[in-house]
Structures are given as structure tokens and as C-alpha cells.
Image (tube, helix red, strand yellow):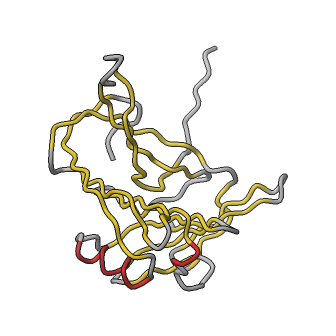
Amino acid sequence: MKTLLTIQSGTSRVTPVSIARQDAAVMDYLQKAGVSHANVVVWQVNTIRWGKWEQGTLAFADGQEAKTALWLECRIFNEEKELHLTRQKDQLTGRLVEDGAGEATEYVDACSRFWGECKAREAGWMTLRDDDRKLSLTVPEAEGTARFYGLVTRNYIGIHEKTAQAGYTDYRYVQIASADQDVKGDA
């Protein structure tokens, strides 16, 4: 991964997407889009679920099926692409963002730390716990060993058409990564 919080240059392409709100339709689209592996986060009516897309299968930390009929929003992402969909009646609509293709762009990567410390790793999953607040979250296992983990986002820089001011015009999820920091105090 590139350095966080610095302006980077690259290319990016955004493709509008509309697919049926069905498990098979989502998995078929991922295969056609060339996504071989990715992290998944889904917002449902009653919960937020983390999962993985690997070898043509959606697997979730809770061990349950995808249940796309209950999805309100989802982000399926890796370091190269993100499929971001929201529920629109019987469809899931949104966009596929692909880095490394398309038009020239500038962006800034940032990492937002999840609450809780990594307390367990098992079978490709890791559990983050905030013992004081009695909260836990199970997410796909990230590379390396760290105490804290966070979500890396890629924030695209653009010019607002009406105000001509530069700022972030879009963003996408990139990966789950270590959020440990070396803190060096001044003496």
C-alpha cells in the first residue's frame, strides 16, 4: 500500500451498475467484473455483516448465507476495485470503481481505526473487542499482526463544478490494515 495522507497520482474508472437483488446475480456480476477476492461489508435492516468473496463464493463471519433480499447497502472491495451498491426496490444499483484503468486522477489514502483490539484470529477471521464497552466485531483477517486495525479508504480529489474549489469528490474502501502507530514524544 502507498503512503497514507499524501496526494498520489493514478488512474481510475467508474462504471454504473444495476443488478437484480439476488445472491446469484451479485456473485455472477463479481465474476464477470474479474473480482477474484475481496472483503465485503453489508448493511441490512437489522445488522451489519462482514464477509469475504473468494473462489466464487460469498462467505460471512456469522456463517449465514448472503441474504441479498435483506441488503440495504454493500461494499465489496480490494486494493484494485470496489463494487458499491444500494437497494432500489428489486435492484441493487451503484458503481464499480477500478483503479489502474481509465482517466488520470489524484487521491489520498487514509486509515480509520476500528474500535477494539484484535483479541482472536481463527480460520481467516479476526475478532476485535472493546472490553470496556462490551462490543465486538468479526472482520476478514488482515495481513500481519497488529493490536489495532482500521479501514483504509481512497479519497479522490476533484474540482467542484460550481465553486471551482478542490476537494474530495468520491471515495472507496480499499482494505483492512494495521492501525498501530509508533508514538514518539518530544522530550
The x, y position of residue 49, in whole percent, is 60, 69
The x, y position of residue 62, in whole percent, is 63, 79
Res. 155 image quadrant: top left
Asked whether 133 or 179 is in front, the reply is 133
Q: Is residue 30 left or right of 141 when viewed as pictured? A: left
Asked whether 129 or 36 is in front, the reply is 36
Q: Relative to 104, is 42 above or below?
A: below
Asked whether 31 or 61 is in front, the reply is 31
The x, y position of residue 23, in whole percent, is 44, 82
Q: Is residue 148 left or right of 110 when viewed as pictured? A: right
Residue occupying image coordinates x 40% and y 48%: 172
Residue occupying image coordinates x 39% and y 52%: 174
Q: How many marks?
A: 0
Q: Is residue 187 left or right of 176 when viewed as pictured? A: right
Residue occupying image coordinates x 60% and y 84%: 63
Res. 26 image quadrant: bottom left
Give the quadrant of the C terminus: top right
Q: Relative to 174, is 181 above or below?
A: above
**Seen from this angle, which residue lies furthest top?**
187
Residue occupying image coordinates x 37% and y 34%: 169
**Seen from this angle, which residue lies furthest front?**
89
